[in-house]
Image (cartoon, rainbow, N blue to C red):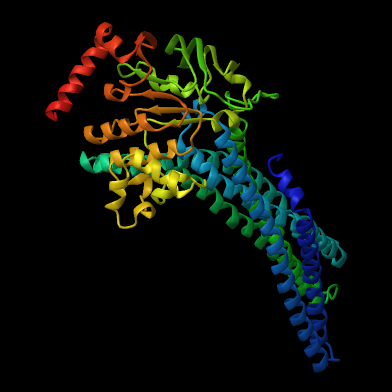
Amino acid sequence: MKLIYPYFKKNLYKILLGILCMIVVDATQLVIPQIIKHAIDSLSSASFDSKTLIFQCAFILFLGLVMAGLRYGWRNLLMGSARDVEKGIRDDLFSHVLSLDMAYLDKVKTGDIMAHATSDINHIRMAFGFGLIVLVDTFLLGGATLAIMFWTHPKLTILAMIPMPFLIVVTRTLGKKMHVFHKTAQESYSQLTELIRESFFGIRIIKVFNFETIIGNKVEKASTDYFKKNLKRAFVTALLKPLLIFFLNLSTLVVIFYGGFLVIKQVLSPGELVAFLQYLGILAWPVIAIGWMTNLFQRGMASLKRINTLLDSMPDVTSPENPNILSKVRGNIIFKDVSFAYDKNKTILSNINLKIHQGTSIGISGPPGSGKTSLAQLIPRLYNTSKGEISLDGLDLNTFDLNFLRQHIALMPQEAFLFSGTIRENILMGRDADEEKLERIIRACSLKDTLKEMPDGLDTIVGERGITLSGGQKQRIALARTLILEKPVIILDDPISQMDTRTASKVISRLKKMALNATFIIISHRISALASCDTIFILKNGRIDHFGTHQELIEKDHFYKESYLVQQFEEDYGA
């Protein structure tokens, strides 16, 4: 409940005003049966007055209009507050997910988070909005109705309430079932959402390899599982309302049977019996609403528990309480006995020691799986080291505020991810940049000729994940996005892997000529991308195997020399 409290407090005046409107509506609703009672008693007596009947009908119409206006008011106020709760929780959830580190996000399924952000939050909104409405109606309208019924005829009221204990037992029993079935249905919904998301994400692979039948069967199986679990929940929900109405009809039967004898004996007037039936009808809503509220509440609590589990997950990578702040980041980076593992059973990096001086360019190469990308991700603290220390300008990375650290480090990931938007939006990402600077970066990334071929140039829509572009084009746009930030530390993880040899050579040549005055760390399998680096480190099995200049490594490292000769052959003969 602590998740909802801040928004409840924020909308307190709206909630109180909405409750006030509900109280007036409920009070008006209780007056109408009394008017009907007098009207019927007047009709059954000799002193019938048509003017009085017209006045009573007009008064009922007036009260109906008042109720309609105030009912709109409380729905708008209370449901509006529930929508604000929904928005607030969704914003908090999204912000919290962004604050989680990569180690957590590597383990959690995207479909599970999507289910939290959609279905679960919707159930919480319903429980908060309609739950509050039902709560007020149950205590105020239900309590006042019962009081009037006792005032009219206590014995008849007691007889009418005989089925109610059975109703409470049914509500409690089915309520527990609802909670269990809703929890399992939401878990199944998360799995289905993740499977569908993954299928759309890999739609090209599915089509190329003719996996439609296989994936279709998997989705159908997950969909059937969700259908069956949802059907159990729907069965309990569907069973609740008919049982409630059945017990209410039993009460009506008792009132008509025993109340009829009371009218015959002239203990009750016909108008009082009709009014009593009206009040029993009014009481039906709070009683039915209890069952509905139980359903909503159980769903809401189950969803709230699921969301709280996510919100209670705290990142391992955090900012210190009293962070260090540098007036100027120069870019001196030192790895001292650094080891890293994604889990305890598999070490990725072991005892890494290296010094990177400001303004220098460092190359990192090695066989696949040697830990190159992992090493790069430790510098902006996407992960924490398992052992050892990484320092920036003489200060431990762990002593910096994460935002400050990442504001001074630009990392181009191995995967060239583009957002759905224009090329300009993907490069600038909401930042301002003068046209001259943008033009210089575009030229450096060999995008100028590519943009000329596009009818809208920089304003070309790239589609979802850059669907309209080739792999090399996406990589050059991602490179431009990294370089335009002009940060003191720039890390490029395989920046030319998807470019053709000619384009890659142009990009590397132009990068060399750019005076960015930054510390460059370039990870690549292509030796041409590393040849001009001041120092090149070769990683093997998570350790630094060799390091030196391009020429030194050709002479003393077999892996580097062999890679260089093979790539030279490919470039010379277009293999």
280 relative to 266 in the view: left or right: left
Viewer-nearest residue: 283 or 89: 89
Q: Is residue 514 above or below residue 36?
A: above
Residue 490 lies in quadrant: top left
Give the residue drawn at x 51%, y 26%. 382
Q: Position of residue 472 (x, y in %)?
A: 29, 38
Q: In the image as oriented, which residue stretches furthest toward the top?
A: 556
Q: Quadrant of the N terminus?
A: top right
Task: Give the vertical position of 359 relative to 540 (above or below).
Answer: below
Q: Position of residue 66 (x, y in %)?
A: 76, 75
Q: Residue at x 50, y 22 (%)?
A: 379
| 298 up-or-down from 47: above or below | above
Direction from residue 202 to residue 126 in the image, left or right: right
Please tell me in which quadrant of the rendered image residue 305 appears: top right
Q: Which residue, as the protein is rendered here, is positioned at the far left?
A: 573
Q: Quadrant of the C terminus?
A: top left
Q: Position of residue 361 (x, y in %)?
A: 41, 22
Q: Residue at x 54, y 48 (%)?
A: 236
Residue 533 visible, this angle? yes
Q: How many marks?
A: 0
Residue sitting nearer the eye, 321 or 229: 321
Along the viewing direction, whichever of 208 and 68 lies nearer the viewer: 208
Residue at image location 54% in from the left, 24% down from the top: 330
Q: Residue furthest bottom?
A: 50
Q: Position of residue 22 (x, y in %)?
A: 76, 64
Residue 219 seen by the camera: no
Instruction: Judge left or right: residue 282 versus residue 359.
Output: right
Q: Viewer-proximal residue, 211 or 37?
A: 211
